[in-house]
Amino acid sequence: MVGAMPPEALPREVNGNGYTAKQHLHLPLQPQAPAKQPQPPRAEAECKWYEEEIDDDLKLCYALNSVLHRGASKYQEIALLDTKHFGKALIIDGKMQSTEMDEFIYHESLIHPPLLFHPNPRTVFIMGGGEGSAAREVLRHKAVQRVVMCDIDQEVVDFCRTYLTVNREAFNSDKLCLIIDDARAELERSRERFDVIVGDLADPVEGGPCYQLYTKSFYEHILKPKLNDHGIFVTQAGPAGVLTHKEVFSSIYNTLRHVFKYVQAYTAHVPSFADTWGWVMASDHPFDLTAEQINDRISQRIEGELVYLSGESLISSATLNKSVYQSLLNETHVYTEDDARFIYGHGRACCA
């Protein structure tokens, strides 16, 4: 179980990529017919696969080197896999959350657009974000003085602090205030207001802990009042491909249009997700910077080099293909507690 490991079971070996390795925990294999003649062991014979169900008749498969850890908390299932193609991969509730090979695409796209469009971001509230990568990217902004990260699941946070060593500096920052609680309840109680609020939440999965944080009532009555003047809200918004954008992306976009004056959807391809991914920014002030102005702010405000995002790529990411653009314009569904949309499927590891 995640969060219930004795000290002696904690990892003792760190590889050079910011993820920690421990003794491999192999999933049970299906029985195999005995070989006619003994054969020397081969790595290929030990290969297993992680399957993620996308639809009733569609699955994605990732070849595994090993299962590093798996367990379950009160709220969700969690696993750390060592995949052959994408390196270490974090899985929550059967859905790929990030991999060491390409997580920078997701997290740069989530964090830097709202902080760059804001005139002077000093305070940031992260809903979810237990992995620590969102906080890591926020803390690269020189102007930021305080980051509140509120995740509901202590065991997931502890797991990520232990295994995702690339984010240990962020977790140890004096600027980071980590709160274990329901983000909705925390925002309701808090007297603080923030320059930027980030929704780094799991996809809305039926029975999961997050779908109520995508609703119109939450955005309108709880979240928006906690933004300062010129405040910006951003959320991950699920798959945004030609065949997948109607699952939740168009609905999240339309829901925010009912709450904020200016709403900007943008997308990027994330290879490990095998799809285009979507984010939505919202504010009562326009997003009107040019690519040149964004590049100036990147060079002035951010420590180190961004790997994925530039002024030009950010501007172009908001140009959607005709199919997705028309769907967003014509979407009528609004997220409510009684009328929510959910991401399909669940992942599992299995034999090849």
Image (cartoon, rainbow, N blue to C red):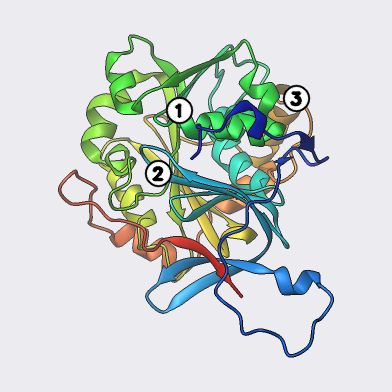
Q: Is residue 126 above or below residue 276?
A: above
Give the labeled residue for mark 3.
303
Amino acid carrying label 3: it is Glu
Amino acid carrying label 2: it is Gln
Q: Earlier in the sequence, mark 2 or mark 1?
A: 2
Q: Earlier in the sequence, mark 3 or mark 1?
A: 1
State the image coordinates of residue 253 (x, y, percent, origin top left): 36, 49
State the image coordinates of residue 296 (x, y, percent, origin top left): 72, 30
Give the labeled residue for mark 1.
154
Few, some or many residues within 10 Å of mark 2 (<14, 14–19, 20+):
some
Figure quadrant of the C terminus: bottom right
Few, some or many residues within 10 Å of mark 3 (<14, 14–19, 20+):
few
State the image coordinates of residue 50 (x, y, percent, origin top left): 57, 64
As helix, strand or loop, the secondary structure at mark 2 comes to: loop
Residue at 33% across, 13% down: 190
As helix, strand or loop, the secondary structure at mark 3 comes to: loop
Q: Is residue 135 above or below residue 188?
A: below
State the image coordinates of residue 241 (x, y, percent, origin top left): 48, 65
Residue 28 visible (yes or no):
yes
Q: How many marks?
A: 3
Residue at 65% across, 23% down: 170
Of badges 3 and 1, nearer the viewer stands: 1
Give the labeled residue for mark 2.
76
Amino acid carrying label 1: it is Gln
Quadrant of residue 22 in the image?
A: top right
Q: CA distance from mark 2 to mark 1?
A: 11 Å
Q: Is residue 109 above or below residue 345?
A: above
Residue 137 visible (yes or no):
no
Residue at 82% across, 81% down: 39
Of badges 3 and 2, nearer the viewer stands: 2
Residue contact between numbered discs 3 and 1, judged by CB atoms under 8 Å: no
The residue nearer to you, when weighing 27 against 134, is 27
